[in-house]
Image (cartoon, rainbow, N blue to C red):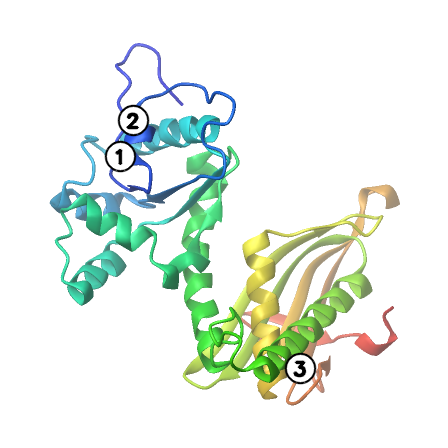
Amino acid sequence: MSRKGRARRISDCTAGGFRSNARAPHRRSDGEGADQAFVIGVLTSAADFERARAWRVTDAPDYERYLADTADLLAEALRRFDTVRARMFHPQDFAEFCVLHGLDPAEPAARDRYLLNPALQTQLLAYQGEELAGDFVPRLVRARENGLTLRHADLILDGGLYGATGEADEDHGRWVRTAHQRGSEVLRRMLVGAGAGVYELRVRVDAPGGRLSAAARVLQWEDGVVRINDEDLELVCAVLCAGLALELPGVAVLHGSQGSAAACGEYRPAAWAWSSGGPDWAPAARPVRLDGVAAQPGYSLGTVC
């Protein structure tokens, strides 16, 4: 947010699509910004900020000031555009992108092409006014990692995950959609069976080209309402989809605190494990340790409605 006592300065270093509009702050009038999207890349660490200096992407004197300026820019964008999205501005990714396409990284057009590259759209997050330096910056980092995994999953599914196969192969698209629905149902049954609580779900599938991994924090209320970040939900379902579609070996662990405030604040540690080596998921045959988390064989998903 703007600080009192200093001149307001907004860097457009990583803004894409509507830079000229982003410079002049004012409240959106009726119809202005309708059906338009504002996209911005955010440097997520002081080290990345220092590397980006060579490309003159910001005139901020330090990373703290850069974050404050970027928060101002995002707040302004929320007033003016229907959709505001952000992604991590990763210096190494950007440098490689410029080499691949023969671009000058110091040119604003190069940054726009990088931010709006269709192959990287899975890294975008909707911004809705969150504190930038709090939860949102770490989410941007995870979104990049998630996006790379989503691209891997889409690749081994021959483009079926995001419709790259087009209408030429309807059977293939239908096959992937069916697997995705089955993966979503597996996730639903895992969470319903766990009941109210605070959990973390980790899924790993051994896929061609390397493992597919996903993790998501889950908050489930007594009435069954579940809170999970959209980007994490998308990734978990994609990994489950790839595993089921190709019948790949995999393991999943759901762990955390089972219980609720309604039960007088009684929380119990819980950790369940499932595995898959074919067309379905079942309780693990033996205790499992995944990413340092030990879990006992989980409940049968077939018994969960």
Q: Which residue is mark 3?
A: 275
Alpha carbons under labels 1 and 2: distance apart: 8 Å
* Nearest the eye: 46 or 234: 234
Alpha carbons under labels 3 and 2: distance apart: 52 Å
Amino acid type at mark 1: Asp
How crowded pointer 3 is (Cα within 10 Å; few <14, some 14-19, many 20+) is rated as many
Horizontal and vertical percent for residue 234? Answer: 58, 61
Q: Quadrant of the C terminus?
A: bottom right
Alpha carbons under labels 3 and 1: distance apart: 47 Å
* Nearest the eye: 199 or 7: 7
Mark 1–mark 2 CB contact (< 8 Å): yes
Name the residue furthest top: 5
Quadrant of res 70? top left
Horizontal and vertical percent for residue 173? Answer: 58, 78
| 102 displayed left or right of 123 | left
* Nearest the eye: 269 or 285: 285
How crowded pointer 2 is (Cα within 10 Å; few <14, some 14-19, many 20+) is rated as some
What numbered label is drawn on residue 49?
A: none
Compared with 223, 117 (above or below) is below
Quadrant of res 68? top left
| Mark 3 vs mark 1: in front | 1
| 39 displayed left or right of 299 | left
Q: Which residue is mark 1?
A: 12
Which sits earlier in the primary sequence, circle 3 or circle 1?
Answer: 1
